[in-house]
Amino acid sequence: MSTLRSIGFGTTWGPFPVVVWIGFATYLLLLLTAALAGLKRQIKALRRVPVSVHRGLGVATALVATFHLLLGLSAYL
């Protein structure tokens, strides 16, 4: 856990530690996944996007969120 702690909180990119940037990426992936599903009815170009893209974004969101969770918990374990 000390390796994850040093990666998550010891390394910084700009003003924030890595764990915060990964949290931003998780939130962005979540918004993209939801927007893709929600805007398919309104935007015709999105109707051509296959369901596998939405599923892939969901899997990517889950993986990044899990890594974000591990980095966050490493501060306490």
Image: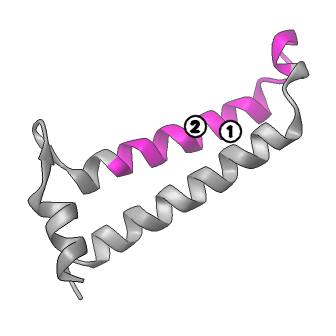
> Vertically, is 33 above or below 45?
below
Amino acid, disc 2: Leu
Residue shown at the point (59%, 60%) measured from the top left: 62
Q: Residues within 10 Å of mark 2 (few under 14, many from 20)?
A: few
| Rendering quarter of residue 40 | top right
Q: Main secondary structure of the magenta part?
A: helix
Residue shown at the point (48%, 67%) measured from the top left: 66
Distance of label 2 from label 1 (alpha carbons): 5 Å
The reply to whether dot 2 and dot 1 touch (C-beta < 8 Å) is yes
Comparing 14 with 43, the one in front is 14
> Vertically, is 53 above or below 49?
below
Q: How many marks?
A: 2
Q: Residue 34 — which label?
A: 1
* SS category of the residue bearing label 2: helix
Farthest-out residue, top: 44
Residue 67 shown left or right of residue 61 in the figure: left
- The image position of residue 42, as x and y in percent, is 83, 15
Q: Residues within 10 Å of mark 1 (few under 14, many from 20)?
A: some
- The image position of residue 31, as x and y in percent, is 57, 37
Residue 16 shown left or right of residue 66 in the figure: left
Residue shown at the point (19%, 72%) measured from the top left: 5
Residue 8 shown left or right of residue 54 in the figure: left
Q: Which residues are magenta?
A: 22-46
| Rendering quarter of residue 25 | top left
Residue 39 shown left or right of residue 35 in the figure: right
* SS category of the residue bearing label 1: helix
| Rendering quarter of residue 72 | bottom left
Residue shown at the point (14%, 68%) measured from the top left: 6
Amino acid, disc 1: Ala
Residue under circle 2?
A: 31
Image quadrant occupied by the N terminus = bottom left
Asked if the stretch drawn in magenta spans residue 50, the answer is: no
